[in-house]
Image (cartoon, rainbow, N blue to C red):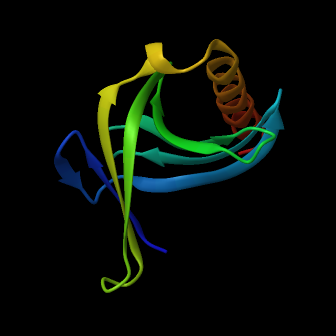
Amino acid sequence: MEEGLSKQGSLSKHWLLSKRKTGTFGEYRIKGHQFKSPTGEVGWHITAGNQHGLAEDYWVSGKTFHALNIQYLHKMNHRMVLEVFDDITSLISSAKKEAVLRAIAEWETASSQHP
């Protein structure tokens, strides 16, 4: 599936999917897709679910969590468009924030050690 990124209203096809990772961190099952822009900016599409199966999607850049809307455009070659919205960091529980940030840190560290 091709993936595009619409960041704060401006469509950018130039962000490239560079990694796909999954793991369990604390009580959360976390799936991450890392994207990189042509200027080197990095962001993660994160899906974090708890033991009850409730999952939420976020865009994470640095330590900032943003609301995320995902559109699947099946008539356009199975393309997925991510729309990134406002900073919602203060609305995320501390436990979930810590788990997500730990997952991202581990995934980024593992990649830098094993190019």
Question: Where residue 62 sits in the image (x, y, percent)?
Answer: 48, 22
Residue lying at 71% horizontally and 37% vertically, measured from the top left: 107
Query: How many numbered marks are there?
Result: 0
Relative depth, front residue between 22 and 69: 69
Q: Is residue 51 visible?
A: yes
Question: Where residue 99 sits in the image (x, y, percent)?
Answer: 71, 25
Q: Is residue 46 visible?
A: no
Question: Where residue 36 sits in the image (x, y, percent)?
Answer: 43, 45
Q: Quadrant of the C terminus?
A: top right
Q: Does 20 appear above or below 95? A: below
Q: Does 76 appear above or below 56? A: below
Residue lying at 60% horizontally and 17% vertically, measured from the top left: 93
Tell me if 92 is positioned left or right of 98 in this view: left
Relative depth, front residue between 109 and 2: 2
Q: Residue furthest left?
A: 10
Quarter-of-image position of residue 100: top right
Residue lying at 20% horizontally and 54% vertically, measured from the top left: 11
Tell me if 7 is positioned left or right of 64 in this view: left
Tell me if 45 is positioned left or right of 98 in this view: left
Q: Residue furthest front?
A: 52
Residue lying at 74% horizontally and 38% vertically, measured from the top left: 50
